[in-house]
Image: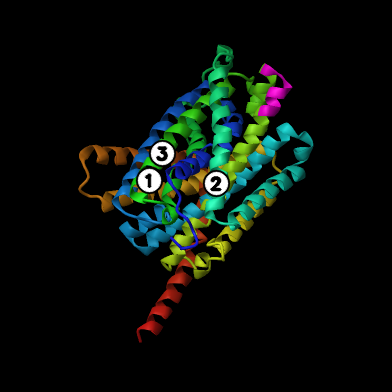
Amino acid sequence: MTSRTRPLGLWMLIALVVGNMIGSGVFLLPAALAPYGAASVLGWGFTLGGALLLALVYAWLAQAMRNHGGGYGYARKAFGDGIGFVAAWSYWVSVWTANAAIAVAFAGSLGAVWPAATATPLRGAFCALGALWFCTAVNLAGVREAARMQLVATVLKLVPLVLFGVIGLGWIHAGAYRPFNPSGQPLLQTTTAVAALTLWALLGLESATVPTGVVHDPERTVPCATVIGMLIAGLTTMLACTVVIGLLPIDVLRNSAAPMAEAASRLWGPLAGIGVGVVATVSCFGALNGWVLLQAQTPLAAAQDRVFPAAFARMDRHGTPRFGLLLSSVLASALIAANYSRDLVALFTFSILLSTATCLLPYLISVLAWWRIDPGAAGLRKLVAAGALLYSAWALFGTGMESLLWGGVLVLAGLPIYAWQRYRTTLSDAADHP
């Protein structure tokens, strides 16, 4: 922790977890789940269970060692620099690809309130890019300023979401859930596909473990924030998404860029739709702000250990790792620009599966790291960790071949950088110790 940075407390850390988890997924995910109908509830069940197992493992890791950089720090401690680099690089890729998806979802939500803003794919792309770079500018002002914005945004979106889910339960109709599995795929294949999509809505459960270098009393604060934040966000997201599926016809749902706003508008009138659209816009913006904060923290930790290039560790006068922050936003912008011709739902689905695939690899490595860091753990903890490991592997398979291939290419692209960094480190050490 630098002298220029005041520590983050429990409530700010819970807001970071909840704010990062409740973002674009809860508002746009029902459209991606539309082809699976009521069968999506099974996928949600597996996802919530698996996410809770992962949250517990991350909480135990935070208790076992003080760490900065989340899964990267645990991987490096357990397996050395090489695996640590793979975990850090893969997680970093997952974050900036997630930011592309969240920015796209922001554009979709804004379009529900102001249709002209996303009337064409090009306009939608410009809205997404504008939100991304505004959040980048906020984070350049410092970590605590970004955390304050995250706390406010989390409160503004959590309360309306809970109210929508509870009130909406009284308006759903059973016909919307028939047939049970409209995809026509085998139920196991459907559940696997849904689990991969819904995990996107719960990515961020590890958020509290990433900026621990700027957290007050991390051994106590990080585990509490991780488990509490995951339960709040997970249950709220599942309730809201399931209610939306029960409110809209499947043909409307699958093509809607703002399905929750569409549902509110049909039930309670245009003003309700606009109101939900505003909440969705605030939610996506808050999540984007939180993930932009994280996109520089993992490379920062790796660079401080000389595993990433030194440029990622350079701080500006606000204590912000400017290079990592700007490079991440440039890469997210490139992903948006390269795919802007797709409609918003298709671009969102592609981005979330790519982000999920690259995030699940650090999840797997983190669980394996726990086994090595805490070999004397009680039997129940080992059973939970085994479940988290199986779930991560299963969800990774469920992201699909396209996402796995693209994720593999992006991870492999980092290996030459690691080799060059190792070479420079070796030369530096030789010069210091002739």
Label 3 secondary element: helix
Residue type at numbered disc 1: Thr
Q: Which residues are magenta?
A: 268-275
In the rendered structure, does residue 271 fall within the stretch colored magenta? yes
Which residue corresponds to the image point at 44% horizontal and 55% vertical from the top-left? 214
Q: Is residue 216 left or right of residue 144?
A: left
Q: Earlier in the sequence, mark 2 or mark 1?
A: 2
Q: CA distance from mark 2 to mark 1?
A: 17 Å
For this rendering, which residue is in front, 30 or 34? 30
The C terminus sits in image quarter: bottom left
| Quadrant assignment for the N terminus | bottom left
- Looking at marks 3 and 2 on the same chain, the residue that comes earlier in the sequence is marked by 2
Above or below, 75 relative to 313 = above
Q: Nearer the viewer, residue 353 or 108?
A: 108
Residue 394, labelled with which disc? 3
Q: Secondary structure at mark 2?
A: helix
- Can see residue 151? yes
Q: Which residue is mark 1?
A: 221
Q: Which mark is residue 148?
A: 2
Q: Look at label 3 and name its amino acid.
A: Trp
Residue 373: image x %, image y %? Answer: 27, 53
Q: Residue at x 48, y 34 (%)?
A: 233
